[in-house]
């Protein structure tokens, strides 16, 4: 953490970047860091390859997020958040990152770090936003209310609203500190957990496509481009839907397969905790955490589904 903090302190022009299909933590930690650094008079630019889920458009500073790269030489430092592989940020930004003299990483995902000049990667944290908050506190940075709001959303969403196994006492302390610094829970929750009819219809499609096997311990489902089109939804509408499969009583491991516009299949896996789904994801070139991991694979839906189902079945059989 100290190396990353020193690198940030020395920079006056900072480029903040996180992963594609950004979630609440990717956006919350990026925007949170932007507000923290802007309060110190630093010049900050934010990049996201998108698409941005609607529930995060309210975040203060969202209008500053851009999918346009800066000119080379315009930035002193890139800070990569909520991921540690440049390819995770998108093809355009990965190329750009590789040319930069200084990249610092803050992330809570599993896996080897082979990139960057300073990296603070620690899977014991529930969220990158939790890490950014602790960084700010240990460096004595002031936390403006806008930063607190963004960081709170990151912690809130990556813990499933303080429900998942990663919800430690430290998470509650950080959340309390952010609430004290100006994050307003009820206004935030109304945005983040707004009822969106098209999402519920999508959930209906997911339940229609549900396949339970392994005595009900494995749940698989899928969403095709046609399903998305039918309900008028896009890829960013699936973020919260994935969680519902894992919580079907008796289900230990779940996976949702979705076709993307490029014809590849995005796989989202969830586990209640006994099977480490990040192993399956990392083996296939993806990543994540023990209980939530993902990978994007070339191939048709049936083939990818069969391959992943076999690996998850093996994970379940190894438990017995
Ligand atoms: P989700 O299924 O919600 O997209 O992602 C679950 C977890 O796995 C998140 O922590 C996410 O960052 C990670 N993840 C999802 N897809 C990929 C991927 O293609 N590559 C890597 N490295 N991580 C992924
Ligand atoms: Mn995260």
Image: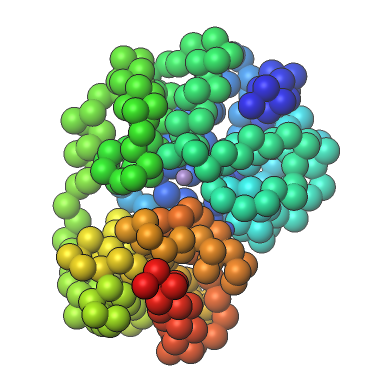
Q: Residue furthest front?
A: 320
At horizontal 57% and vertical 80% (from top left) the residue drawn is: 298
**63 or 42, which lies in front?**
42
Looking at the image, residue 263 lies above or below residue 15: below
The image's colour scheme reads: rainbow
In the figure, is residue 183 to the left or right of 15? Answer: left
**313 or 182, which lies in front?**
313
**Measured from the top left, where is residue 272 in percent x and y?**
32, 58
Q: Is residue 21 visible in this depiction of the protein?
A: no
In the figure, is residue 7 to the left or right of 263? Answer: right
Looking at the image, residue 180 lies above or below residue 76: above
**Measured from the top left, where is residue 152 in percent x and y?**
36, 30
At horizontal 45% and vertical 16% (from top left) the residue drawn is: 143
Q: Quadrant of residue 221?
A: bottom left
In the figure, is residue 7 to the left or right of 134? Answer: right
In the figure, is residue 213 to the left or right of 123? Answer: left
Q: Quadrant of residue 162?
A: top left
Figure quadrant of the C terminus:
bottom left
Looking at the image, residue 189 lies above or below residue 280: above
**Measured from the top left, where is residue 63 in percent x and y?**
45, 38
**76 or 209, which lies in front?**
209
Q: Count how many numbered circles sit on residues in the image.
A: 0
At horizontal 73% and vertical 38% (from top left) the residue drawn is: 103
Q: Is residue 55 visible in this depiction of the protein?
A: yes
**Measured from the top left, where is residue 153 in percent x and y?**
35, 36
Figure quadrant of the N terminus:
top right
At horizontal 75% and vertical 42% (from top left) the residue drawn is: 116
Q: Quadrant of residue 57?
A: top left
């Amino acid at each position: 953490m100290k190396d990353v903090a020193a690198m940030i302190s020395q920079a006056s022009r900072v480029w903040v970047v996180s992963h594609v299909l950004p979630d609440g933590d990717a956006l919350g930690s990026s925007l949170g860091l932007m507000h923290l650094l802007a309060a110190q008079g630093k010049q900050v630019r934010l990049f996201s390859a998108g698409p941005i889920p609607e529930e995060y458009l309210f975040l203060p500073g969202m209008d500053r997020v851009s999918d346009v790269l800066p000119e080379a030489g315009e930035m002193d430092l890139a800070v990569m958040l909520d991921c540690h592989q440049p390819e995770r940020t998108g093809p355009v930004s990965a190329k750009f990152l590789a040319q930069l003299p200084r990249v610092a990483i803050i992330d809570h995902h599993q896996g080897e770090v082979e990139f960057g000049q300073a990296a603070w990667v620690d899977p014991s944290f529930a969220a990158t936003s939790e890490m950014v908050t602790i960084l700010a506190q240990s460096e004595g940075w002031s936390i403006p209310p806008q930063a607190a709001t963004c960081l709170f959303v990151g912690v809130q969403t990556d813990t499933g609203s303080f429900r998942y196994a990663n919800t430690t006492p430290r998470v509650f302390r950080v959340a309390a500190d952010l609430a004290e610094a100006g994050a307003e829970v009820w206004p935030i929750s109304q945005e983040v957990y707004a009822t969106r009819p098209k999402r519920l219809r999508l959930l209906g499609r997911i339940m229609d496509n549900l396949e339970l096997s392994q005595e009900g311990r494995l749940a698989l489902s899928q969403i095709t481009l046609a399903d998305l089109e039918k309900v008028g939804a896009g890829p960013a509408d699936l973020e919260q839907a994935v969680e519902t499969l894992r919580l079907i009583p008796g289900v230990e491991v779940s996976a949702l397969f979705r076709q993307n516009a490029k014809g590849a299949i995005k796989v989202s896996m969830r586990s209640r905790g006994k099977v480490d789904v990040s192993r399956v994801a990392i083996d296939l070139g993806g990543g994540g955490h023990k209980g939530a991991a993902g990978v994007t694979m070339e191939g048709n839906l049936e083939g990818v589904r069969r391959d992943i189902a076999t690996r998850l079945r093996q994970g379940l059989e190894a438990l017995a």
